[in-house]
Amino acid sequence: MTTVLGIKHNRRQFFLLVLINLFVGSMVGLERTILPILGEESFGIASTSAALSFIASFGFSKALINFVAGNLADRFGRKQVLLAGWGVGLFVPVLVIAADAWWVIVFANVLLGINQALTWSMTVNMKIDLASAKERGLAVGLNEFAGYIGVALMALVSGYVASSYSLRPEPFYLGLGIAVLGLALSFAVKDTGEHLSLQAKGQEKEGVKPKEVFWRTTWSDKTLSSLSFAGLATNLKDGMAWGLFPIYFASKGLTVGQIGVLVAVYPAAWGFFQLFTGGYSDRIGRKKLIVSGMVLQALALWWILLVDGYALWLVGAVLLGIGTALVYPTLIAAISDVAHPEWRASSMGTYRFWRDSGYAFGALLAGVIADALDVASAVGYVAFLPLLAGVIALVRMKETLDLGK
């Protein structure tokens, strides 16, 4: 069978990967409503920074494995790495159910970070392999849409289950089912090595060493490094939101069910609007969406602090999700525009290393500020980071999409 690029020509494989990433996101969504409250109520964690240690462990492990995931995919194939990620994910809900100490929860989130790095990295790379150059934004948008709809749905469902039964173990039985389904579906995926070879065909070989790819993506290439910092600031904000939003809204007197809705609406908006923002960036370019999205994230956080009332907080959560949706698929598409197919997976791994280390830095920074001042101050100060990233992208980044083609 002839190998052809394009979503339409590879639709069965492409949409199977979309479905798989729905389950990948669901693994994270399972924890977003419950774990910050679990730390306080079940394990007596009084310090905010200590309570957020599970996010730091998730962020650092995900970032480190992201860094090597591209190289692993080049060596063993994308499908094998995807299956390995689901194999690790099976242990996460089991450990949370059985945990008798907080360090077990922290370790479970190390494994969750590995699971997310291997599975999410491979689903997005495989979709980019299948898509044509003019469909990369759409491909990434559909991938991220599925993942974050999974986050939102499971945050909502787990909050409902926890309020109806208890914080543990009932919600995490769902996690076992998710991991088994994700693994089963991944066995049906075909590797995309032939599509990757087709993309590289006709392009001059570059022979760039891994160290050079890391340096380019981190600093020396102004565009790639601006993208990396924007990704870091976005997930730094998300690490803070993950850890502090349940605590902040609980301090305002909301129930676990209400908190579950607020915590779910933000990634739901993030996921839904990526259906449009990724493809839109294929038409108008990447830079405008990245700059405006970073600024909107900062403004949405300040809105949440300034208003009072459930309906207004819902508006803030939606705005935060839209701001994130503007940048999330667009950043990855922009990396794909710049990086040569030979070293694209490695560049993507470096970008995702910096982006997902933001979870850890966000949890640590937010925890320290919350302990020193209060939770509201932590939210407010963290908002300056997305704003700074937007300014840096405006000044340093070049438009990556050739709109003349």
Image (cartoon, grey):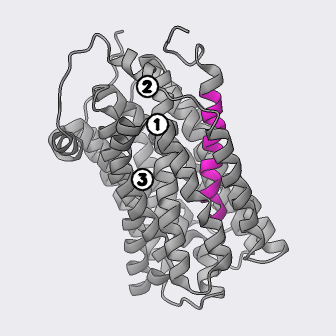
Name the residue nearer the viewer: 168 or 270.
168
Question: Marks 3 and 1, how far apart in space?
Answer: 26 Å
- 65 versus 59 height, above or below: above
Give residue 170's quadrant in the image. Answer: bottom right
- Where does label 3 land, which residue? 234
**Which of the two marks, 3 or 1, is nearer to us in this view?**
1
Instruction: Look at 52% across and 38% down and name the residue there.
Output: 123
- Where does label 1 land, which residue? 78
Q: Is residue 333 magenta?
A: no
Instruction: Look at 72% across and 75% down and name the residue there.
Output: 254
Report whether 327 appears left or right of 275. Answer: left
Q: Judging from the image, what secondary structure is the residue with disc 2 in?
A: helix
> Quick check: marks 1 and 2 in contact, CB under 8 Å?
yes
Question: In the image, which disc is placed on residue 363?
Answer: none
Report whether 236 appears left or right of 98. Answer: left
Point out the residue furthest to the right here. Answer: 164
Q: Position of residue 20 (x, y in %)?
A: 63, 41
Q: Position of residue 354 (x, y in %)?
A: 32, 53
In the image, which residues are magenta? 14-33
- Where does label 2 land, which residue? 193
Question: Marks 1 and 2, how far apart in space?
Answer: 8 Å
For marks 1 and 2, the one nearer the N-term is 1
Question: Marks 2 and 3, how far apart in space?
Answer: 31 Å
Q: Residues within 10 Å of mark 3 (few under 14, many from 20)?
A: many
Name the residue nearer the viewer: 191 or 354.
191
For marks 2 and 3, the one nearer the N-term is 2
User: Which image quarter is the C terminus in?
Assistant: top left
Instruction: Look at 14% across and 41% down and name the residue there.
Output: 220
Report whether 373 appears left or right of 41. Answer: left
